[in-house]
Amino acid sequence: MRITSFNFFVFLFLSLVVFYIFPKKYRWFALLGISIFFFVFSSSWKLLLYMIFGIVVSYLGSNIIEKKCKNDKSKKIVLFLTLFLIVGELAILKYINIFPATINLFGSLFNLDIYFNTINLLAPLGISYYTLSLIGYVTDVYRTTSKAQTNILKHALFTCYYPLLISGPVVRYNYMQREFFEEKKLDFNNLFIGFTRLIYGLLKKLVIADQLSQVVNAVFSNYNYYTGWYLVVAVILYAIQIYADFSGCMDIVIGASKMYGVNLPENFNSPFFSKNLSEFWRRWHISLGTWGKDYIMYPLLKANIFQKIGKKCKKLFGKKIGKLIPTIISILLLWLFIGLWHGASYKYIFAAGILPWIYLTVGQIVEKPIEKLTEKLHIKTECFSFRLFQSLRTFFFMCVIWLFACSPSLRESIYIIKNIFVNASLLLRNELPVIPILPILFSVTIVFIVDYLNYKNIDVSLKFKEQNLIFKFIVLFAFIITILIYGAYGPGYNPTDFIYGGF
């Protein structure tokens, strides 16, 4: 069930009726039934078995760690076995083909007559997201920062809550426990705010992302034909597309969840206004970055082997550089994980893993020299022009990453870069799909203004709620009409899945 389809809105309306009919004390149970129905209706009841496996393993593991283990050694053993089973399921379903793909790539590079067939396995909806949440939950129980849930049905709701299965965000149990299990009253403010957020997400997805995808796909699938500036423009459009797609999805799921009275954490915070790449990654896919730091980067830095590496590096290279090396290694491992999480492909490992790590490492090294050079040249840094330069510079570096990400493969991305410079002309071609430019510009402008106000710490949703009823009606009516007239959907249209829904 696509959350941009008419079926979803029928489902949402009926599920809200069912949810608020239930007694307040048991509305969490209604959410569980609604989520299971959504999962089965969207995929298959057979795939539900995979999710049940993760639920049972994490439930048993967390409760054994908290109640049965008497010492740290036994806790570590149970933690390892639990995480091994949870991660193992994800690895088998999503990454089983990375080995044959590596062998096949090696053979093609060296003209060797070797080829391994790949295995096509269906993975359950949202497995990349709920697996990370379960890993965090079990680890928090081991760290005693979270209590183990003794009710397996409540634990199941944490795992399979349907808005989280689409494209995240990755959530923590301590936060969601309060949201799920407090008694939920029928609050019309929640319904209005959630509906408004949902409509705003549909505007991003259907009017901006799905319309731009037609041009982006046409150019990148024919990169030998659309060379030069066509490719440059396509990369810029892809940057707008992926943000409108992913943040639009977040708006829809956060809005839908709000209508049940369940508040989900934000996953974006005006990333295109970032002054540097470090700030950008703090504002983009916030929940994944935070999860990676808490459960990969920081534990690695505290590990004995990294402590030993740090001590040896301090002796060899001095205190300053020696302290930096373990951090750089742990960040590399974090970004390799993020790249692999995006997909079992070297394209993602490079574009979403190695390349951002190179950017951030080089940026950290040259940060101080650039600051000193800026001071010597008497460049004003506290002015609009310099801040604009910083944002455009960050956007340029991200476009390089997205060029690799939206290319068919890592090898073909090299040909695309070559075709940008081989023919830098922009010959007009009539074969590109026709898209409604003015409505797209209108929608992009709205998103830009909203993001800018949020960047300035102005709560746009709160300000909008405070306006007169007639103003709110006009704005929502304009959004809905724009979606209905200019949104990419309907007969003959091949709907575009959410980009991050495939990760």
Image: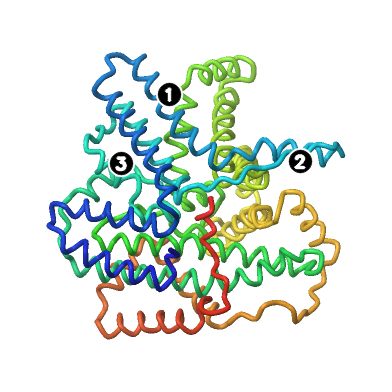
Q: Earlier in the sequence, mark 3 or mark 2?
A: 2
Q: Kindly identify the residue that appears in the image at 28 percent across and 18 percent down.
A: 69
For mark 3, give the secondary structure.
Answer: helix
Report if residue 371 is visible in the image: no
The quadrant where residue 481 appears: bottom left
Whole-number angstrom distance, CA of label 3 to CA of label 2: 41 Å
Please state the horizontal and vertical placement of residue 281, each as a whole percent of the image: 51, 49
Whole-number angstrom distance, CA of label 1 to CA of label 2: 33 Å
Q: Residues within 10 Å of mark 1 (few under 14, many from 20)?
A: some
- Left or right: 272 as drawn, with respect to 143: right
Q: Residues within 10 Å of mark 2 (few under 14, many from 20)?
A: some
Could you say which disc has been placed on residue 80 in the image?
Answer: 1
Q: Kindly identify the residue that appears in the image at 47 percent across and 45 percent down.
A: 128
Could you say which disc has been placed on residue 173 in the image?
Answer: 3
Please state the horizontal and vertical placement of residue 317, each as a whole percent of the image: 64, 20
Q: Quadrant of the N terminus?
A: bottom left
Please state the horizontal and vertical placement of residue 448, each as a whole percent of the image: 48, 69
Q: Residues within 10 Å of mark 3 (few under 14, many from 20)?
A: many
For mark 1, give the secondary structure.
Answer: helix
The reply to whether dot 1 and dot 3 touch (C-beta < 8 Å) is no
Q: Amino acid at mark 1?
A: Phe
Q: Amino acid at mark 3?
A: Tyr
Q: Nearer the viewer, mark 3 or mark 2?
A: 2
Whole-number angstrom distance, CA of label 1 to CA of label 3: 19 Å
Could you say which disc has been placed on residue 105 in the image?
Answer: 2
Q: Amino acid at mark 2?
A: Leu
The quadrant where residue 325 appears: top right
